[in-house]
Image (tube, rainbow, N blue to C red):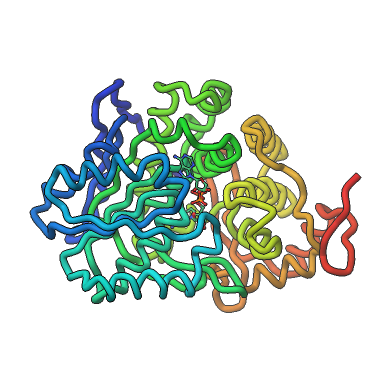
Amino acid sequence: MTVQRHIEVPTEGEVSRIPVALSDRAYDILIQDSLLDGVGDRLAAFHAGQSAVVLTNSTVRRLYGTRVKRSLCRAGFKTVTLIVPDNEQAKSLKWFSAVLDELVKRRCERSTWLVALGGGVIGDLGGFVASAYLRGIPLAQVPTTLVAQVDSSIGGKTGVNHRMGKNLIGAFYQPKLVLVDPAALCTLPARDYRAGMAEVIKYGVIGSEGFFEFLEAHMEKAMGLDPPVLRKILTCCCRTKAEVVAEDEREGDRRRILNFGHTLGHAVETLSGYRRYQHGEAVAIGMVWAAGLARCLGLAEIDVENRIRALVSCAGLPVERPPYRPAAVLRAMRQDKKVSDKHIHFVLPTAIGKVVVQPVSEPDILMALRTASPRADRDGRVSRP
Ligand code: NAD
Ligand code: GLY
């Protein structure tokens, strides 16, 4: 499975419009600096409701809440802001229910917009709330992290975590619009920016050797938020995601490639209690490990694993082995949504830009985890020198 094509990149100030072709649920991703000041006008163009609930957290509200609220008010929207905690724990049934309580209390209507302003946590929770309240209200994704701008705001996967596993409860619910303001990334802490780079590298591995080579050549500039490099990255990633989602909205087949690095990544997140690793860091560990698994299974040359490891490392992301006992990791993987017929499926790179999705037997997984794992204690944790 590959995605290869020439991509037009807009110049500074230009708006880039990327369509997500989903017939009656089609929408655009718009990328432009200062788009946060235009949220109100963009929503008003739908001629739908005139009220909006902005869902965010205190960090993002402090940075961008006033600008977004002002823009909504200027465009004639009656606006309220709801704040949830700034951590992965907000992606829970507890907070899902608390936000719904607020919408009911405030008598929000079917035409009320839910504006998810923040990273992937806000987008996933907000999208799920929008899907459920009155059986669906209009949703605008306004992503402010790199993970959210290249991945989570697009494609309609919404939901919350369960203590037994990541994203186990949720719905497919597409937004009406995704508004990407690259300038918002300037305030993102370095660790969060790096975490997003894992999803960026993912797009190169699953679909485009050319894009992967671009990243190999420009990672330093990318890490320094060089505007033209960042624009190219956002445009390439959003286009690839839009194209894959348009072809396979509900992950029947092709969309599964977007899960590269995620089977192990989600297990690592779950085992760490969503604390030690950020989502992108866990995905980075998962991508390097999956490349090693592909090599162990004879599907890829060692060069593939080495290039992925080198690029992930160059982005300052962890390439370490999963720091938990193999049996605990395997148990966590069995909870993954991608288990079908009791088989755990992996996205495995056979070359840069080319992946296959296939089940891997538990003995093979354990073997790969064992050869990759240092000694662990009885709780599944490992100590490192
Ligand atoms: P996040 O939402 O927790 O954001 C990371 C941190 O950055 C938070 O502290 C947030 O407050 C802060 N922040 C956000 N924007 C900022 C800005 N512009 N400046 C300063 N700080 C800012 O984490 P994330 O990495 O964006 O998202 C991770 C979540 O996304 C995970 O729950 C993951 O499962 C989910 N995800 C979903 C999909 C999907 O398809 N739905 C895809 C990938 C990831
Ligand atoms: N982030 C994986 C997907 O959207 O399918």
Please state the horizontal and vertical placement of residue 113, each as a whole percent of the image.
22, 59
Please state the horizontal and vertical placement of residue 344, each as a whole percent of the image.
62, 68
For the point 71% across and 53% down, the residue is 293
For the point 43% across and 32% down, the residue is 233
For the point 11% across and 47% down, the residue is 45
Residue 155 in the figure: left or right of residue 307: left
Q: Nearer the viewer, residue 162 or 64?
A: 64
Find residue 198 and report its image quarter: top right
Please state the horizontal and vertical placement of residue 51, each as a whole percent of the image.
17, 59
Residue 228 in the figure: left or right of residue 361: left
Residue 210 in the figure: left or right of residue 36: right
Please state the horizontal and vertical placement of residue 154, each as a whole percent of the image.
36, 51
Above-or-below relation of 317 to 214: below
Furthest toward the left, the residue is 47
The answer to whether residue 205 is visible is: no
Q: Give the number of marks.
A: 0
Q: Can you say which quadrant of the picture contains the C terminus?
A: top right
Residue 10 in the figure: left or right of residue 3: left
The answer to whether residue 365 is visible is: yes
For the point 34% across and 73% down, the residue is 100
